Image (spheres, rainbow, N blue to C red):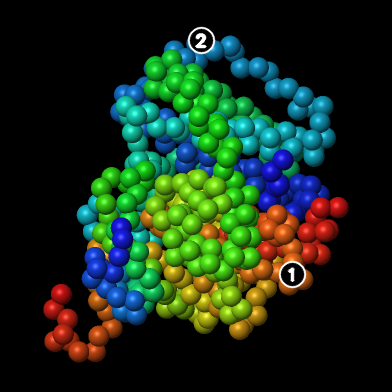
Amino acid sequence: MGAPEAMHRFHVGDRVRVKGTNPAGNPRTPAYVRGKSGIVTALHGSIDNPLDHRGVYPPLCSVLFPVREVFGGASPDTLSVDLHEDWLAPAGTAVPSRDAC
Amino acid sequence: MAHSTQAAHGHMQDYEGHVQAVEADLEYWRTKRLEPRVIQLHRRGVVTLYDLLRAAAHLPAPSAPTGEATHDTEGRIRVLEDGLDEYIRGVALASIDSPDHPFVIEDTRKERGDYDDFFRIAKPPHGGTLKERIARLEHDLREYRRLLQVLMRALLDKGVLTTEQLERQRAFLSGRGAWNGARIVAHAWVDPVFKQALLARGREAVRELNIPPGRLGKLGVAENTATLHNVVVCTLCSCYPHDLLGDPPWWYRDDGYKERIVQDPRGTLADRFNLRLPESVEVRVHDNTSDVRWMVLPRRPAGTDGWSEEDLARLVTIDSLVGTAQALTPAALAQNEC
């Protein structure tokens, strides 16, 4: 573990979009945030959790979503979901040439 | 004796609520914990269905129903609740990993259909009058406990588990509990340096209190403030820092809670938990996804200046650790304890 920032593709404050389909081997992303965009609020690094799953999943970010963007409506509340980076893509950039990844 | 951190939800006047809780929790432990494990053990040839038949033949015949007719409704519900507690403890014991046959939790989640409804074990419908529902629970619980007893016998007969391992696990399970969470919160209220350490490196920090930190990923601690109220759920399964805090309340595993709290956090807290928060407070739901397991650090109630940590800890209910309640006020504590 140690300094988690070094292993991350994303930074706190980045806007990210959750992929719609499972990356190989890692099912742990709730269906309701798939395809949705949120803001990275914390970086946790790659978490060693051998009692839970085999191998090590990619680095984990906390991502904050407004309830209204996920479910519609006018709720002022938020959802914080911890997502592994293989589930995430950059989102929300207005400059198309910058994002080739 | 350890202080109970069960909130004083519904007194026994609310038979309906108690029966509903037993129905939900019993089916959770059967369909999500015990039976997927039985199927998994069979699939891998560790303990097969035929081993279970042999073990059953060596056990005394199941005893006839005892005393159900002699109790009134409240007495029958209490017997059910005690039986459920025993069932839950038994399932936890039967789920120990043998070093020769390691399972990871993720295998169980796949096996029980957390990611694919195809694998889900059906639950029985729970309709009828209160008396019919109680009778059905008594019947089901007897059968479920019989299977558990047979499985335990087969695990020991086949040498998958030893009695020493069972004793160690029993001791470990009794050392967990929401009381740990209450001590952690009370210490954070009085010691700002500890609080910072807890927020940054939760598991390492709790060693200071001689609490075994557990090993299930990272402990996330979400601090409530004047403008932010946190609440925890696990929509995919029921992840919780249970190696540190013991089992969450039964409704934490309830699909109704999981679905509603993410769609309407504020409304769910108000309607289901009678927790009404002003508009100036943001409600933030943390969905546990197993690598970080979250607990809430509730706000310290007013009127507790100069209280000892021991007394402060009595204000911390299990619901306040999940975020569906605030910590008790001194007045509420006095009322609960009289």
From the viewer's side, name the closer residue of B183 and B107.
B183
Q: In whole angstroms, how far apart are the C-alphas of marks 1 and 2? A: 61 Å
The answer to whether residue B200 of the structure is visible from this angle is: yes
The answer to whether residue B231 of the structure is visible from this angle is: no
Q: Residue at the spot x=45%, y=40% of the render?
A: B121
Q: Residue at the spot x=27%, y=55% of the render?
A: A57
Query: Where is residue A52 drawn, in percent x and y?
Result: 36, 46
Contact, CB < 8 Å: mark 1 with mark 2?
no
Chain under disc 1: B
Label 1 secondary element: loop
B211 relative to A101 in the view: left or right = right
User: Disc number at residue A101?
Assistant: none
Return the residue found at the far bottom: A95
Query: Where is residue B101 drawn, in percent x and y?
Result: 33, 29
Q: Residue at the spot x=76%, y=47% of the render?
A: B15
Query: Where is residue B61 drawn, in percent x and y?
Result: 59, 13
Residue under circle 2?
Answer: B58
Which image quadrant for residue A63? Answer: bottom left
Tag 2: amino acid: His
Q: Which callout, 1 or 2, points to the residue nearer the camera?
A: 1
Determine whether B130 is above or below A38 in the image: above
Residue under circle 1?
Answer: B305
Query: Where is residue B253 drawn, in percent x and y?
Result: 54, 51
A86 relative to B173 in the view: left or right = left
Determine whether A10 is above or below B165 in the image: below
